[in-house]
Image (cartoon, helix red, strand yellow):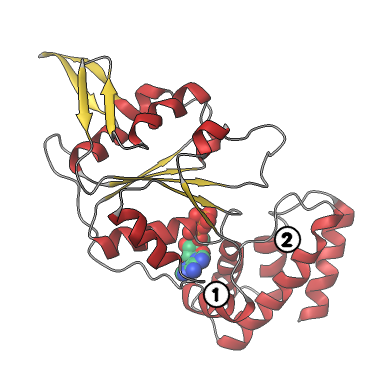
Amino acid sequence: MPRGERLPFPTAEPWYQPNADEVQVFEQCHARQLAVMLKGPTGCGKTRFVEHMAWRLGRPLITVSCHDDMTASDLLGRFLIGTDGTRWIDGPLTRAVREGAICYLDEVVEARQDTIVVLHPLTDYRRILPLDKTGETLEAAPGFQLVVSYNPGYQRMLKDLKPSTRQRFVALEFDFPDADREAAIVEREGAIDAPTARALVSLAGRLRALQDRGLAELPSTRLLIATARLIGSGVALRSACNVALIAPLSDDPALVGAMRELVELTF
Ligand code: ADP
């Protein structure tokens, strides 16, 4: 986006099917300027929820996928040397703070601790962002809200958020939707007929029961949608399940064999 241009406001509604009262709770958090943490497995609707809420609240949304090479400067900004001298370029967090956007840090646990700490002064009553490099201290514009996502199961032994960070957020728990809701999502997002969507969800239920047999990640709603789309574009049903649902989940031949049997049982 060219410099000086303001962030776009969301126009079309990103469809989101609520599971409980998360829409209302989030609205209250926004009104009270509270930072929110979305906890839950990958592919269960956290990103879609934030997109929907940004649209609902009429705020621009800036999304950052966190990774372990990410530095504080990647969030805050940096000086760039150009032909006309040195100029400061805002990072995504700074931009969101200035413009009153919702800033969504996806998989925040991936970021290093010294990167995460820059969030702290934004998550309490001060709502400030000190920019050491420019000497500025920004006060967050009224609509600014910090939202982070966090998958508690993933790499739990290796990485976790510090309690001093966690306690700065209201935590909303996400999980895969119940069967009726998930079937409606797969039908709509996967553009597939209702009976096939239902069958895919029932297969997912059986696959998710294999968690104790060593599945690191459970089949997500996202994987079901990808499978549905392949089926919709003419790929044979079992083949679509094998490539889009099962192969991404495991390389262990015994586990893959067990999952394929469940596909045979379902269709
Ligand atoms: P996450 O951010 O939790 O990894 P996403 O929000 O990207 O997951 O969800 C994956 C896809 O599943 C979305 O793009 C959307 O198509 C669908 N989805 C999941 N949950 C919902 C929901 N409650 N309402 C609408 N779509 C959903």
> For the residue labelled by badge 1, is the local secondary structure a helix, a strand or a loop?
helix
Disc 2 vs disc 1: which is toward the camera?
1
Classify mark 1: residues with Cα within 10 Å, few (<14), some (14-19) or many (20+). Answer: many
Residue 230 can be seen, yes or no: yes
Rendered image: mark on residue 186: 1
Q: Nearer the viewer, residue 116 or 25?
A: 25
Classify mark 2: residues with Cα within 10 Å, few (<14), some (14-19) or many (20+). Answer: many
Residue 67 can be seen, yes or no: no
Q: Amino acid at mark 2?
A: Ile
Residue topped by disc 2: 246
* Residue 31: x %, y % from top left: 28, 56
Q: Quadrant of residue 203?
A: bottom right
Instruction: Work out whether mark 2 precedes mark 1 in sequence or the reverse, and give the earlier one.
Output: 1
Tell me how far mark 2 sits from mark 1, CA to CA.
Answer: 17 Å
Q: Residue at x 58, y 54 (%)?
A: 40
In the rendered structure, the answer to whether residue 259 lies left or right of residue 22 reads right
* Residue 109: x %, y % from top left: 55, 36
